[in-house]
Image (spheres, rainbow, N blue to C red):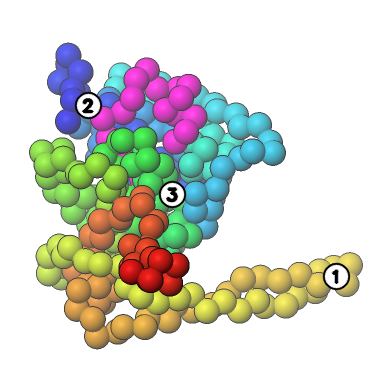
């Protein structure tokens, strides 16, 4: 990782739970000894925003704290807005590393495509920045991140030493259990599964109907030991390398056979 003259890499931090969330503040405290920390994160919770950007409204940034090797900004936009604004307007130069999280709740399996936490990490990756998103399997605002911080510290030490392949970022999910119960870290693939949504129909005080999203995750391959959901269910930290290339190469073969007969 490139370093400044003071031997401190510039690290951009963002999330989707908001700049005041417990997870991002635990991450900031962990990262402060490691580099020059610049935080640009949504001013409020933006969970489920995926890779959304603001195109019909302006985006504002507000400096909340400025100390030696620490700058914290809130952003009125989405997680990806926050990263874009940081890279293009706020940071003094391109960051050496982007860390997103710590998310309150899982981003395993198909949740990766809905996650604003991973949207921020993927945006960093698109800009050629080594990027990683961290999530703890506890959605509570009062979640205890002490175990996650110990694990993240070890993962980041290795990521600083070993460069990620271009076009790849990491989706890291951590079980919410005591440290002595975590069996280790596993490199996994994304579990095939789906959220089966239901909408709870309710009535507002004026008699109008509105709908509240609910639902459950359905795992299509419960016994597959190479997946992130299996790893997490069996007390492992799950790391899934994510590519920004959405191309289906099997689909290219199918279409070439159909169109060209080859």
The vertical placement of 210 against 48, above or below, is: below
**Count of numbered labels shown in the rendering:** 3
What is the x, y in percent for residue 37? 31, 29
How far across and down, in percent of the image, does residue 104 sit? 41, 57
Q: Where's the C terminus, which quadrant?
A: bottom left
Relative side of 103 to 60, left or right: left
Q: Secondary structure at mark 1?
A: loop
Q: Residue 208 got which mark?
A: 1
Which stretch did the figure color magenta? Answer: 83-103
* Crowd around label 1: few <14 · some 14–19 · many ≥20 (10 Å): few
Q: Position of residue 24 (x, y in %)?
A: 38, 44
Residue carrying label 3: 119
Residue that protrudes farthest toward the front in the picture: 261
To which residue does mark 2 refer? 9
Q: How far apart, in angstroms, are the residues tagged by discs 1 and 3?
A: 34 Å
Nearer the observer, 161 or 184: 161
Foreground mark, 1 or 3, reads: 3
Which residue corresponds to the image point at 19% horizontal and 44% vertical from the top-left?
164
- Horizontal relation, residue 89 to residue 76: left or right: left
Image point (49%, 53%), residue name: 50
């Amino acid at each position: 990782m490139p370093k400044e003259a003071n031997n401190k890499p510039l690290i951009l931090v963002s999330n989707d739970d908001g700049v005041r969330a417990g997870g991002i503040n635990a991450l900031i405290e962990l990262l402060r000894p490691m580099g020059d920390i610049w935080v640009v994160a949504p001013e409020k919770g933006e969970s489920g925003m995926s890779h959304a950007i603001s195109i019909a409204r302006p985006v504002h940034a507000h400096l909340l704290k400025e100390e030696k090797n620490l700058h914290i900004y809130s952003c009125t936009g989405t997680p990806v807005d926050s990263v874009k604004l940081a890279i293009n307007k706020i940071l003094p130069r391109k960051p050496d590393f982007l860390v997103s999280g710590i998310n309150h709740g899982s981003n395993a399996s198909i949740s990766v495509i809905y996650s604003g936490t991973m949207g921020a990490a993927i945006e960093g990756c698109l800009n050629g920045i080594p990027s990683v998103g961290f999530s703890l399997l506890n959605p509570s605002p009062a979640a205890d991140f002490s175990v996650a911080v110990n694990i993240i510290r070890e993962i980041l030490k290795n990521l600083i030493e070993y460069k990620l392949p271009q076009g790849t970022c990491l989706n890291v999910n951590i079980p919410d259990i005591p440290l002595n119960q975590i069996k280790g870290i596993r490199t996994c693939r994304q579990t095939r599964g789906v959220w089966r949504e239901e909408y709870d129909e309710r009535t507002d005080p004026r008699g109008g109907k509105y709908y509240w999203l609910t639902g459950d995750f359905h795992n299509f391959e419960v016994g597959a030991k190479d997946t992130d959901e299996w790893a997490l269910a069996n007390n492992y930290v799950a790391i899934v390398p994510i590519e920004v290339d959405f191309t289906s190469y099997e689909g290219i073969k199918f279409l070439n056979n159909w169109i060209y007969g080859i």
